[in-house]
Image (spheres, rainbow, N blue to C red):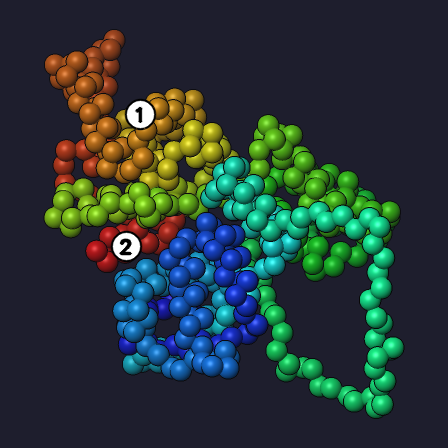
Amino acid sequence: MQNNLKLQDTFTVINRTILHDSDRNILTILYQPIVGAMAINLYFTFWTYLDQSSLLSEVTNHKQLVNYMGLSLSEVEDARKYLEAIGLIKTYVRQSSELNDYRIELFSPLAPSEFFRNPLLCSALYSALGKADYDKAKHKFIIPSIKTDGYVDISTPFHSKFNVIDNVGVDIENIRKKNYSKFKIKSSVDIDRILLSTPDVVSNNIIVPESTKELLCKLTFLYRYNDVTTRELISKSIKGKNVIDEKLLINNFSAYYKFESNNLLPTIQKRTQPMNLREDINPKDKDAKHIYVFETTDNVSYLCSRLKVKRLSDTHIDILNSLAINVGLNPGVINVLLSYILSDEKNTLNKNFATTIGADWKRRNIQTVSEAMNFARTEAQNRKSKQTKTTIKTKGVVKVETPPEWFDKKIEIEENIDKSNEIENLLNSL
């Protein structure tokens, strides 16, 4: 549904769960690295809108929300979409010709045990933090081992202190409880077709519950194995002859990936330039719009835009993972590097070439987008100074070296076909 958010549009916050102060730690440590501080701040702001009963807020317009948070309307909307995508809120809208009315439903973050059992969430956290900080975050929720040797349980049982006089029937349908929202996953494969073509599932007449199918959707989205590998891993996860063991399924998918990728965890590329490394942009600066795009666009979306494709190949994903995890470049710097290479190499991307340049930038401690752009300009000028012209004649063929589109000229904005002009809309909001 197409919907244009306006400042005058109203919203009401509805609490669909029971929120505790302990949830703040979970949101800050586990969710914030994935969705960003802006999105978590929006969640906390929605939380404060609730009345004293913590059930419902008053009707408010988005202009007040924008003023409270000090953000633009587009930033608030983008932050809200991240909360929706990760299952912390649900949004409903009632449209009219004058203004729209929104209903924002709050849900609890998953308990740490459930969070780390979810292959998508723990992989996204690993992608955002890296191994060292991921282990530290996980360690914060580990229960210490307490020895109970020599102790005997002497707790008093219920029946020794209480007598039940009457059996009172209680309607618990509308009693408050902790609720969690499932985030939507669009699997790249047809799970039912995969199951029906897995011999061990068919021959043993295994009935696969919806929870297992949902888990398979998450695993196939995360690991992107082909049909043959997926069927093999499902067969290996059959416990006895009549059930697919979910824990075994997760372990088998993970073990196969680690074997194929030198013991690394899969990563989900959504990261953008860290807030503390973003620039105070002067709108009059000719680089302002490109700096904004490089800093606020994740690497997958940016590369899709440059290559004019809707989905990246496994090779391109591997290059992005290598630049982010192995080389350790910041997301905004990676975007500049991609622009620099693709402009010079006629829109072709080679892993060895990209990681070699990336490693050089890392050694030079290039952290910000401006540093990356300035260094790229310097490199291009150094190459140019070694030549009398910008053309190199080789065996009668003329090769023209093309600098990045932001090099020494006004910025031209390209359409981002995979994000429905989202980048262009971001630029127009400046």
Mark in the foreground, 1 or 2: 1
Q: Residue, x 37% and y 37% (percent of image)?
A: 330
Give me the residue at 56% from left, 41% from top. 135
Q: Is residue 343 above or below residue 188?
A: above
Task: Name above or below for residue 344 compared with residue 161.
Answer: above
Q: Which mark is residue 134?
A: none
Checking the image for residue 364, the label placed there is 1
Question: Which quarter of the rendered picture does the C terminus lie within?
Answer: bottom left
Q: Is residue 230 above or below residue 159?
A: above
Residue 81 x %, y %: 42, 61
Other residues around mark 1 within 10 Å, as few (<14) / some (14–19) / many (≥20): few
Q: Quadrant of residue 364?
A: top left
Amino acid residing under circle 2:
Leu
Q: On the image, numbered disc 2 is attached to which residue?
A: 426
- Image location (x, y in percent) of residue 394: 24, 11
Residue at position x 73%, y 38% from top? 232
Q: Is residue 150 left or right of residue 402?
A: right
Q: Label 1 is placed on what type of residue?
A: Arg
352 up-or-down from 172: above or below: above
Left or right of 11, for residue 196: right
Report how far apart the C-alphas of labels 1 and 2 lie in the structure.
30 Å
Question: Which quarter shows the N terminus?
Answer: bottom left
